[in-house]
Image (cartoon, grey):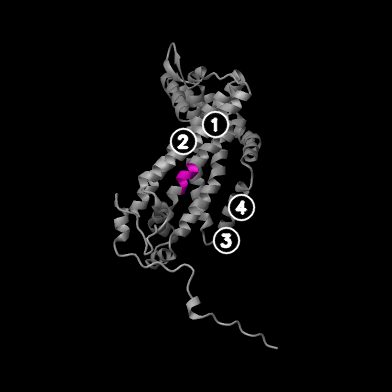
Amino acid sequence: MAPRPFPALPPEHNVPAFPPRPPRPKGADEDARRPGSPSPRDAFGTPGAVEDFLSPPAARRLDAALLALLLAAGAWLFWNGAGRMDYAWNWGVVGQYLVRHDAERGWVPGMLAQGLLVTVRLGLWSTLLALCIGTGMGLLRASPRLFRRMVARTYVEGVRNLPPLVLVFIFHFFVSSQFAPLLAGLFAPVADGAAFLLPPVARVWLAGASAVLLAPPEQLPVFLSGVVVLGLYEGAYITEIVRAGLEGVGRGQWEASASTGLTRRQQLRHVILPQAFRLIVPPLAGQFISTIKDSAILSVISIRELTFQGMELMAATYLTFEIWLTVAALYLVLTFSCSLAARRVERRLRRAM
């Protein structure tokens, strides 16, 4: 027996649950963006979005009040927990670990400030190395040849699926220990010849330049080892950023540039990369912030960056809360400043596009 069809509803029941809104008049969006303009409303007299219930100044005041409430609650919880532990706070000695006065040189950076400078240098050099590696591997990832794509994918999958701490140990204790004697044997004659030819003033100047740009000469091998391993780790993520930027350029750009007789290298140089650059820069800024935070892992190989200096001070002074809160504040100031700069660059690029 065939099933009976479902009876059709009367015409008065064929009404949508949410009637469509009438089209907005021309120029309404421009008027809504003007300061002081009333909130846009639809035909039923209700605001068009949840954000329209509050004006922008009122919304900012509400956000500030909620942020202040959360900060006050966090401070109360932290202070209450510290009080129950019967912890003796001693913030008076923290300042000398940031800036201290030397009898001969005057005001000099303290241990935490020195660690912050090393962290910045690690982030800059590692990002530069990762950018070179990521650009090359990203071009291989977008190559039409299978072998090149497989080489780049092997590098990306191999690095991204390893914990960074394991990668640091492997590179420092196995790879670096094997190549360091070889490099020392190659560059020792060059260094001896330069030391013999250069005057003492030039040698002192080179040592000072190395301490400012990289690290002091006695810490240079471990610093370079940390830069290389961090650059390799971050380069895997930059590879995917570059690949996504290249794929974000329309296929028509490739076809149009190929129709003019350009080779693939000329296409990348003159047509594709300039357009992909605007898509790549904002994620690269975020990756630089991640590099700064990931540099804390290098404290396990005794690079004197901010986390390592904090561990040394905590072991020497037993000021656990004061030291680590100061270290966290320094990281926050550094990364938040980079975030604001990245947001400004992204806004300019958006206007240029």
Q: Which residue is mark 4?
A: 154
For marks 3 and 1, give the CA distance: 36 Å
Q: Is residue 50 above or below residue 75?
A: below
| 3D distance between C-alphas at marks 1 and 2 | 41 Å
Q: Which mark is drawn over residue 223?
A: 1
The residue type indicated by label 1 comes to: Phe
Name the one closer to the observer, 328 or 19. 19
Q: Are marks 3 and 1 in contact (CB under 8 Å)?
A: no
Q: Is residue 285 magenta?
A: yes
Q: Magenta residues, as a range?
A: 283-288
- Image mark for residue 146: 3
- Crowd tier of the residue under label 3, counting other residues whose Cα lies within 10 Å: few below 14, some 14–19, many 20 or above: few
Please count the marks in the image.
4
> Residue 187, located in which quarter of the rendered image?
top right
Judged from this view, the residue extending furthest toward the top is 103
Marks 3/4: CA distance?
12 Å
Q: Which mark is residue 72?
A: none
Q: Check disc 4: other Cα within 10 Å, few if <14, some if 14-19, many if 20+.
A: few
Name above or below for residue 348 compared with residue 224: below
Label 1 sits on a secondary structure element that is helix
Which picture quadrant has residue 74? top right
The one of 241 and 178 positioned closer to us in this rendering: 241
Labels 4 and 1: the sequence-earlier one: 4
The dot on residue 68 is: 2
Distance in Å between CA atoms under marks 3 and 2? 55 Å
Give the CA separation, mark 2 to mark 4.
48 Å
Pointer 1 or 2: first along the chain: 2
Provide residue 347's location: percent of width, then percent of height. 37, 48
Q: Could you tell which of marks 2 and 4 lies nearer the N-terminus?
A: 2
